[in-house]
Image (tube, rainbow, N blue to C red):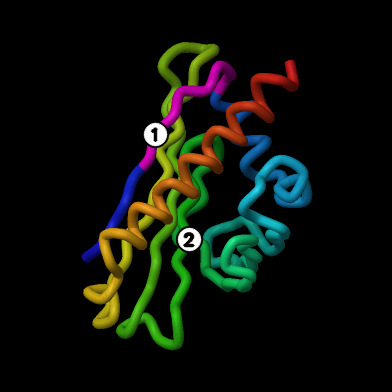
């Protein structure tokens, strides 16, 4: 399995971070990596996201949707036994005004062994940029 994980502290309540993460219509206003994200935010729901650097649209199914705590979705490339990515956001409140966002992805399937360390680092860097943009959006919107 290939994977990468990121983490950032955001000076806001867990509920405020959750509200921005789940406001799909606003992603393109603050996130330089996502031009659109649409779909049904509930377990078993389907979402569709367009990633700017890749100029590609991905579809995924929500595996977990726990209010103010966690969003996990899984997308396939062709078939899950070939290549699948499990993307997650996890929120942990340090105190009432600091929330830690854990954000990452696990790759599985036969083709995942061909994902290079260089590509993983590039993807991790993109997630860090996403996290920083989210932090700025939330902390500047007080």
Residue occupying image coordinates x 34% and y 58%: 120
Whole-percent x and y of residue 25? Answer: 78, 51
- What is the span of residues highlighted in magenta in the rendered image? 6-13
Residue under pointer 1: 7
Dot 1 falls on a residue whose secondary structure is: strand
Q: Is residue 110 left or right of residue 58?
A: left
Give the percent coordinates (x, y) of residue 104: 39, 49
Horizontal and vertical percent position of residue 82: 32, 84
Q: Residue furthest front?
A: 118
Image-quadrant location for residue 26: top right
Residue 59 position within the rendered picture, expressed as x and y whole percent measured from the top left? 57, 73
- Predominant secondary structure, magenta span: strand
Q: Earlier in the sequence, mark 1 or mark 2?
A: 1
Who's the residue at 66% across and 48% down the image? Answer: 32
* Dot label at residue 73: 2
The quadrant holding residue 67 is top right
């Amino acid at each position: 399995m290939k994977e990468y994980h990121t983490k950032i502290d955001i000076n806001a309540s867990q509920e405020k971070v959750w509200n921005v993460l789940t406001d799909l219509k606003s992603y393109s206003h603050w996130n330089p990596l996502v031009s659109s994200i649409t779909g049904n935010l509930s377990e078993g729901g389907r979402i569709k996201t367009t990633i700017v650097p890749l100029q590609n649209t991905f579809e995924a199914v929500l595996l977990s949707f726990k209010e103010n705590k966690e969003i996990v979705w899984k997308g396939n490339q062709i078939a899950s036994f070939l290549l699948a990515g499990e993307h997650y956001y996890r929120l942990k409140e340090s105190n009432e005004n600091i929330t830690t966002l854990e954000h990452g992805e696990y790759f599985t399937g036969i083709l995942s062994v061909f994902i290079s360390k260089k590509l993983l680092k590039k993807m991790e860097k993109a997630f860090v940029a996403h996290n920083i943009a989210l932090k700025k959006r939330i902390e500047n919107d007080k």
